Image: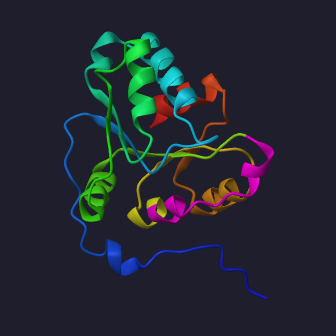
């Protein structure tokens, strides 16, 4: 037997020109729902920003594209980091691919419940096809095993603020 977990069409990514960002950019593209929430990421980003030189704050942005991303914007506003966290709805596929390819880190979030350990989102394969570093807020499980094979990632377990700080400090 050969297990094919998921995949992508490499032709979709052959001629993607990266969008240039002036700031260090962390980008999430997808849908936030159920246990896939931006809460830990936004709270950890807020803590990290409070611990770095103030000049860094103006040179970082976290962009959320997709359905349910208004949740990220609402929490960012509540915490006072809405000048760093920007949200948008769905945008055309070619445009999101350009943005993803130009980002410094691609944010992958998988829920933190027992069932999520077996989740392998198609977003993971898309991110890997783009060849960018991945900031993976994921539980131990299938997705993390695939990321270990990929190699270009920072694993941040849910609610591990120390791991988050280390990931951003070394990204």
Screen quadrant of the C terminus = top left
Compared across the picture, whether 166 is left or right of 160 comes to left
Compared across the picture, whether 75 is left or right of 17 comes to right
Inspect the magenta stretch and tell me whether residue 65 lies in it: no
Residue 50 % position (x, y): 44, 11
Compared across the picture, whether 135 is left or right of 84 comes to right
Residue occupying image coordinates x 47% and y 31%: 168
Residue 43 % position (x, y): 52, 21
Q: Nearer the viewer, residue 32 or 103?
A: 32
Is 163 situated above or below 10? above
Residue occupying image coordinates x 58% and y 60%: 121
Specify the segment rendered in magenta: 113-126
Q: Nearer the viewer, residue 154 or 116?
A: 116
Is 34 situated above or below 62? below
Screen quadrant of the N terminus = bottom right
Residue occupying image coordinates x 42% and y 14%: 78
Residue occupying image coordinates x 44% and y 30%: 72
Tell me which secondary structure the magenta stretch mostly adopts: helix
Identify the colour scheme used: rainbow
Residue 126 % position (x, y): 45, 64
């Amino acid at each position: 037997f050969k297990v094919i977990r998921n995949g992508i069409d490499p032709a979709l990514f052959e001629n993607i020109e990266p969008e240039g960002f002036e700031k260090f950019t962390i980008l999430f593209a997808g849908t936030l729902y159920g246990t896939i929430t931006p809460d830990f990421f936004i709270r950890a980003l807020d803590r990290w920003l409070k611990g770095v030189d103030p000049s860094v704050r103006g040179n970082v942005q976290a962009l959320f594209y997709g359905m349910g991303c208004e949740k990220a914007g609402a929490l960012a506003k509540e915490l006072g980091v809405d000048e760093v966290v920007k949200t948008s709805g769905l945008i055309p596929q070619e445009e999101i691919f350009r943005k993803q390819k130009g980002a410094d880190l691609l944010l992958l979030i998988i829920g933190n419940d027992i069932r999520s350990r077996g989740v392998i989102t198609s977003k993971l394969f898309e991110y890997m096809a783009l060849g960018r570093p991945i900031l993976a807020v994921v539980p131990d499980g299938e997705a993390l095993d695939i990321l270990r094979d990929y190699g270009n990632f920072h694993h941040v377990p849910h609610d591990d603020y120390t791991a988050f700080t280390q990931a951003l400090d070394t990204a």
